[in-house]
Amino acid sequence: MELQLHCILSDLKIQKPFGRIRQSFAVLARMLVGTAWTLIGRFLLAFAVLNAVDAVVAMEPTLQSSAAGDWPQWRGPNRDGVVVGFSIPDVWPESLDKQWSVKVGDGYSSPVVADGHVYQLSRQDDEEHVRCLELESGRILWHASYPAAGAVHSAAASHGIGPKSTPVVARGKLYTLGIGNILSCFEAQRGNLLWRKTFEGRFSKPAPSCGTSMSPLVDGSLCIVHVGHDRDGAMYALDADTGQQQWEYDGDGPGYGSPIIVSLAGTRQIVTPVSKFVAGIDIDSGKILWREPFPTFSTQNVITPLGHRGAIITGGIGQPTVALRPGRGDGVATVERIWENKAVQLHMSSPVLLDGKLFGLSRMKSGHLFCVDANTGETLWQGEGRFAKNAALLVVENLLAIQTSDGKLIFAKPTATGLDYLAEYPVDPSGRAWAHPALVGRRILVKGNENLICWSLP
């Protein structure tokens, strides 16, 4: 650049001035304009790249430290229902092979898998039981139990008093949360109890009306739980190694759904359903960042939210399915409702995202599947009614895996107008498969009424 300018300015000294000067100024002008546009282009490109990176990083969920293909916590590695490492067959078999079945007891707690081990929380008689089984054979490697009181509201009596919270495996430890808020930390390989919290006497009632349902979340050195009653509870961040309290948020009682971790507006935070709100809580301090009123029928805030393009997607009984965008204006927390869809109201089945579309089971029409544009909230299609009382939805590459509460497992490919069924298998003879399945490699783990069953593709 400096060399080019020097050459042009040297030309200005030549005695045949006017034509040569005009020519040199024209060259100089073209060069300066070209240079300016080049710099502007580079600036805009850098700005676009930085913003694209920020858009990706801002909504990236926290991954647990786990091997590829593990299913270490509620709804999988990212708590979003996305399966990694399952072997989709070229041709779907007529039936699955039953590898093993172990009687473990009552409860809707889902199995988790880490490092070739399966962990199951359940109830037998007056105790809660924690088992570690070998994935390959179903052999019990260790087994722990402890006395656990259990009581639920009469409206939930048919659920029983088995645990509903799903354990989490992280950093060589297993964390379980029982129906009455007993939080335990075990050594994952050997089953040694490392620490336990009962929260006894802390709240006016020990658990929500239908029993504790939220699943613990481990993030780095913190174990996050929300315990207590729906009108008197607190979220705790505990040291994951020792159980020592790091912070407490006591502004809301727990919901029945579970928290996720996302970054919104540049702040990494816990987003969780609480008793009558959806809330964002600073993960470092426990301070409330924002709260959106979200009262549901009979205080049943059950859905685990999803992060999508700087927004949070959630729903509930008596509420539309919504996309919320938290932010700040004039130093005050704001929550924008980007879209609402009243036609596909959710209840207990948490939805999943695939290719920019939201798939779920609506409580409307006695339970029907639906597909909604996740960016606009537009309904793309709705399935027939009376599909299922409840269903666990998972994403397996470009397919959906749907386990119904009456014990059927369906693999289907979404289309523009519905689902193309590829395979359907009976996986629970008890017909009470309310726990979510775990899909690992070629194996499918299903917790039914009392048994934990391992199926596999041939």
Image (cartoon, rainbow, N blue to C red):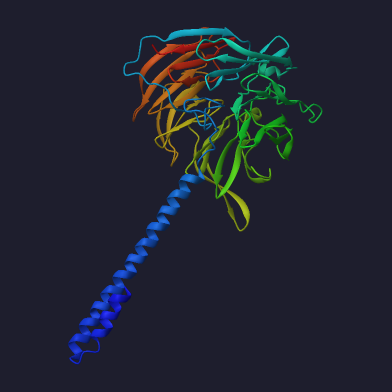
Q: In the picture shown, does residue 35 fall above or below 300? A: below
Q: Residue at x 57, y 38 (%)?
A: 261
Quadrant of res 224:
top right
Q: Nearer the viewer, residue 58 or 145?
A: 145
Q: How many marks?
A: 0
Q: Position of residue 149 (x, y in %)?
A: 75, 17
In this image, 168 relative to 147: left or right?
Answer: left
Q: Nearer the viewer, residue 314 or 31?
A: 31
Q: Residue at x 55, y 50 (%)?
A: 266
Q: Position of residue 385 (x, y in %)?
A: 45, 21
Q: Residue at x 60, y 39 (%)?
A: 271
Q: Nearer the viewer, residue 415 or 269?
A: 269
Quadrant of res 109:
top right
Q: Nearer the viewer, residue 232 or 175?
A: 175
In this image, 321 relative to 270: left or right?
Answer: left
Q: In the picture shown, does residue 306 fall above or below 413? A: below
Q: Residue at x 57, y 14 (%)?
A: 133
Point out the image quarter for the N terminus: bottom left
Q: Position of residue 365 (x, y in %)?
A: 48, 23
In this image, 239 relative to 189: left or right?
Answer: right
Q: Residue furthest bottom?
A: 15
Point out the image quarter for the C terminus: top left
Q: Position of residue 309 (x, y in %)?
A: 47, 43
Residue 229 makes an appearance in the image: no
Residue 196 makes an appearance in the image: yes
